[in-house]
Amino acid sequence: LAAGLMVYDILVSPVDASVFECDTTRINSIDYATGGDALNVAVVAAKLGMKVAMSGVVGSDMPGRTLCEEAEKHGIETSGIRISEKNKTSVSIVMRSGGERHFAYYGEANDEFDDSYISDELLAESKLLYIGSMMALKGLEGEGRARLFKRAHQFGTLTAMDSTWTNDGVWMPKLEAALPHTDIFIPSGYEAKEMSGSDDPAVTVDFLH
């Protein structure tokens, strides 16, 4: 069961600061893709032959339909995806220049997602619950993450999450309650350093344990 970030990506290239200095800038390409860590993991796992379910929130709009269709195309169970009654599907405009990427992100639908959106039935059917981009899910901040992972463990379901970056500089207060109930945690090196205050991997591992 992959749960969390579902995003419709608009990829624009190349874009640099000069785009704000003129009325119209000609670009080389624009592409559309399904994204969000949770949906990406679900699609890749399905391609590897796993039985996969997806849980998240999308809007009642074209990007939302596209994300659901992409999941269904790969045989992913989509009954856990909710259609928001108030928010549009989360969208990222990905601006690329050289090797750099910058994101303009609208995330109201993803912010809506919380632990109540995953049913006991879905957890009971799952061997592993993976939360994609935990720090980008406002509805799961603090005790919400811990409640969800405790509930998963009641059904013998393993729990896993990755982090992603947080722009407000707040790390452990958002994660600490869930970590004792997390079987697999996948922060990046940069993220782990922010959490532990150390760039020594051994110190970081001890801190998170």
Image (cartoon, rainbow, N blue to C red):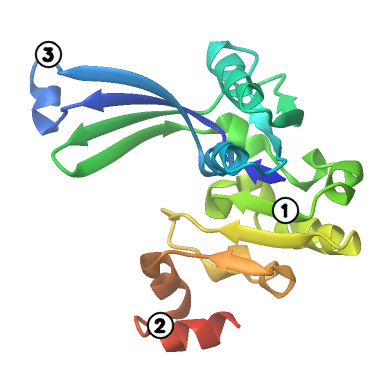
Looking at the rendered structure, the secondary structure element under dot 2 is: helix
In this view of the protein, can residue 142 be seen by the observer? no
Looking at the rendered structure, the secondary structure element under dot 3 is: loop
- Identity of the amino acid at label 1? Leu
Give me the disc on residue 22. Answer: none
Residue that mark 3 sits on: 26
Residue that mark 2 sits on: 201
Disc on the earlier residue, 1 or 3: 3
Residue 114 sits above or below residue 142 on the image: above
Disc on the earlier residue, 2 or 3: 3
Relative image position of residue 56 (x, y in whole percent): 67, 35
* Residue at (42% x, 33% y) in the render: 105
Relative image position of residue 188 (x, y in whole percent): 42, 64
Which corner quadrant holds the C terminus?
A: bottom right
- Identity of the amino acid at label 2? Pro
Residue 21 sits above or below residue 200 on the image: above
Q: Quadrant of residue 192?
A: bottom left
Cα distance between the residues tagged 2 and 3: 44 Å
- Identity of the amino acid at label 3? Arg
* Residue at (51% x, 66% y) in the render: 171
Q: Quadrant of residue 28?
A: top left
Residue that mark 1 sits on: 129
* Residue at (15% x, 17% y) in the render: 27
Q: How many marks?
A: 3
> Is 147 displayed left or right of 8 in the figure?
right
